[in-house]
Amino acid sequence: MNIDLEAIAHHLNQCLQRSGIIGVTAKVSVNHDCLKVVLVSEETPEITDRGELAQVTITSLRDLKLTTIQTVKIHRQQINNFDLDWSYKYKYGLFAENSSNSSENHQNKHQIQKQNTTSNNPIKRDQIKVSQDEFEEALKNCSKTANFAYDRSIRYAKKVEIAVKRINSDIEAVSHKILKFKGSQQFQFAETLKQIQSDIKKISEASLADLVISLDKKRKHLENFTVALFGRTKAGKSTLRETLTRGNGSTIGKGSQRTTRDIKEYSWQGLRLLDTPGIEAYQGDDDTQKANEIIDQSDIILFLTSDDSVQPGEFKAMAQLQQINKYFAVILNVKHDISNNLKDLEMFLDPDIPDMVFDEDRLSQHKNHIQSHIKEYLNLDNVDIVPIHAQSGFLSTQAEYQEYSSQLWQLSKIEELYSLIAYQIYTHGKDLRLSTFADSLEYFINSINQKLAAAKSQLSIQLNFIEQKQREIEKIFAEIEK
Ligand SMILES: Nc1nc2c(ncn2[C@@H]2O[C@H](COP(=O)(O)OP(=O)(O)OP(=O)(O)O)[C@@H](O)[C@H]2O)c(=O)[nH]1
Ligand SMILES: [Mg+2]
């Protein structure tokens, strides 16, 4: 039977999470035409509502239209307990047919296909056109998720803080006990133990302080889905930003110098849009830290490059910043100059003349280069690449080009970029907001983990040394005995 159990489990887990049911993991197996779902849960009071659990599970399975399945059995099991709490049995065929919302099914089927791969797969945007109402509704849901994720993060951080404190006091107690032995102070071991003790304390306090700062910044923007524009100097980041937020052009670069020197924040279509300095500007530790903070605070990263030169260096510079787990797309700004004179401009806008700005052959070469640089430096496959012409987008907003405004806007293809973002927010917005919180927690846990692992290996060296000495002494005693 050709059925992707992993993808089904993944889909179920995402639906459970989206419905605010945390601490429950779905395990899926199949026996002939019966799908068995075991919902393994921690004992938390919020998820005792079995009706809700079953309902969410059924609804999400219904979306998948699993043609080979006739019955579904849902069981709940508590973690570390082999007994099943309760069970439901459904005729899958029945409720699959009852489902009437075909567009909803279409969307979810698309999602399950995507879930087998990374969220960075190119999407077929024509599959879903997100309306303004749907987009606004999605943004509202994203805010709810962010509020929820913030609360959970704070609770989790507190739990970890307690665990780390416990480790510290355990180490303190053990070392106190060891150091009480006569002569123990003469061992190098005593110093190492003291050092480890103070390192763990210092590091865990510093990591926790970083986490608290990061969460506090996120708290201020719980209502703002954040999109950050990164890319090298002169790629056209500020031109794009000015176009989107109807700026007056004052932040667009004029000479050869880099222009944007600091991170600037704007509001666009209910989103928080961040314009950042050219990526090669991040040289000192301070700059890099600022850039990392932006990545940490953002839900979507858009990376601008321009077709006048696609350099591996720009992707390498991006890779040197914090690892990117979030949705990452590339905007390829076509730098063809259309502003020399009006005659030229009319030629570019003439619908009977083949596309001169977006030359497909040239662009596809650029796209191939971009994909391979991104694979090499950022280890991401098949990122979305959206070609735009930022200059015509910006000109379309200017009074002196009013006559050509709608043609210029069309030429810019910025609408496609907008659709891409709207699509991502509509289909994955809540997940993106969740991972913005999960990423910083993960980073925090990993950094503590690394330090604990380093302490452990230091202790192992000491232990090996002591064991070696013990063996030598035993050998001496054995000789004497002989
Ligand atoms: N011909 C052409 N020029 C463009 C286009 N987009 C941007 N430019 C020009 O490129 C230059 C740099 O644009 P900016 O938008 O300031 O670039 P940036 O990425 O913000 O640069 P930094 O702030 O230095 O990091 C400006 O002179 C823009 O007018 C385009 O689509 N076509
Ligand atoms: Mg700029």
Image (cartoon, grey):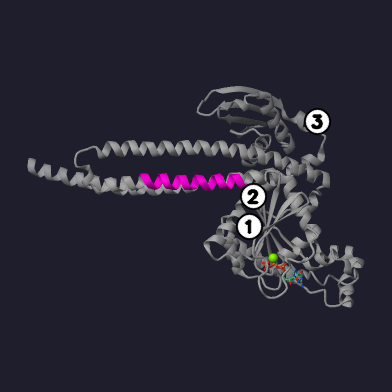
Tell me the crowding category of disc 2: few under 14, some 14 to 19, or many 20 or more residues within 10 angstroms, Cα based.
few
Is residue 207 shown in magenta? yes
Local packing at callout 3 (Cα closer than 10 Å; few below 14, some 14-19, many 20+) is few
Which mark is drawn over residue 98?
3
Q: Which residues are magenta?
A: 197-217
Specify the label residue 381 is tagged with.
Answer: 1
Q: Are marks 1 and 2 in contact (CB under 8 Å)?
A: yes
- Decide if residue 331 is in sight here: yes
- Quadrant including the C terminus: top left
CA distance for labels 1 and 3: 38 Å
Q: Name the residue nearer the viewer: 235 or 427.
A: 235
Q: Amino acid at mark 1?
A: Asp
**Secondary structure found at label 1:** loop
**What amino acid does circle 3 point to?**
Asn
- Characterize the magenta stretch by its predominant secondary structure: helix
Quarter containing ligand 1? bottom right
Q: What is the spatial separation of the Cα atoms under label 3 and label 2, in whole angstroms?
A: 30 Å
Q: Which residue is mark 2?
A: 117
Kind of residue at disc 2: Thr
Check disc 3 and report its element: helix, strand or loop: helix
Q: CA distance from mark 1 to mark 2?
A: 10 Å
